[in-house]
Image (cartoon, rainbow, N blue to C red):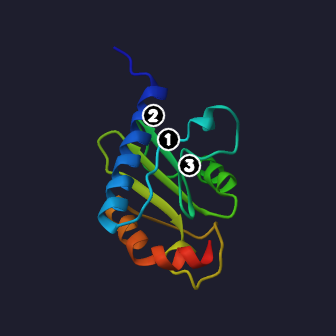
Amino acid sequence: MTINSRNKGAQFERDVAKILNEFFIAEGIDYQTKRNLDQYQGAGQCDLNMPYHAVECKFYKEGNGLRNAWWNQVCESAQGRIPVLIFKFNRKPIQVCIPLHAINTEWEEDNNKIAFMPMDEWLEILRRNWKVYSKIY
């Protein structure tokens, strides 16, 4: 039995959207994200839209780190928002890659300076910085 990689990717996007929507509910944020189906219509669009962020999701069978093409893709689709790359490989935990300025908003915006973290850590950064993001983006 073969697994359709497009279906696997779409399921991962739905799973990430569910995690984010649970976060929004828990934090009292009046927003619900969903898959950006327009991403299949043309280039330069992210997988999930959410306030202040452009989110790209990648799920691959094998690997152990960031692929530059993924980061370039999400930076291109961000269009002034914070690029967020969420990726996973089989039997490994979800990883999130964000620019350092998303962690400390006083730092210079430079999407080439990045940090990797587990999903829970990123959600904590969102929790801490949400109101700050609303004033910047």
CA neighbours of label 3 inside 10 A, class few (<14), some (14 to 19), many (20+): few
Residue type at mark 2 is Ala
* Mark 2 neighbour density, 10 Å: few (under 14) some (14–19) many (20 or more): some
Residue 27 drawn at (x, y percent): 34, 68
Residue positioned 43% across, 52% down in the render: 32
Q: Is residue 9 left or right of residue 24?
A: right
Quadrant the C terminus occupies: bottom right
Q: CA distance from mark 1 to mark 2?
A: 8 Å
The quarter of the rendered structure image containing the N terminus is: top left
Q: Which residue is mark 2?
A: 10
- How many marks do you count on the picture? 3
Q: Is residue 117 above or below residue 135?
A: above
Asked if the residue at tag 2 contacts the one at tag 1, i.e. Cβ–Cβ closer than 8 Å, the answer is yes
Q: Nearer the viewer, mark 1 or mark 2?
A: 1
Q: Which mark is residue 67?
A: 3
Disc nearest the viewer among 1 and 3: 1
Q: Give the Cα separation between the discs numbered 1 and 3.
A: 22 Å
Instruction: From the viewer's side, name the closer residue of 28 and 112.
Output: 28
Give coordinates of residue 119: x percent, y percent: 36, 59
Q: Are marks 2 and 3 in contact (CB under 8 Å)?
A: no
Mark closer to the chain start, 1 or 3: 1
Q: Is residue 92 above or below residue 28?
A: above
Q: CA distance from mark 2 to mark 3?
A: 19 Å
* Residue 88 position (above or below residue 128): above
Q: Toward the viewer: 133 or 62? A: 133
Residue that mark 1 sits on:
35
Q: Looking at numbered disc 1 in the image, what kind of residue is underneath it? A: Arg
Structural crowding at the residue carrying mark 1, measured as other residues with C-alpha within 10 Å and reported as few (<14), some (14–19) or many (≥20): some
Element at label 1: loop
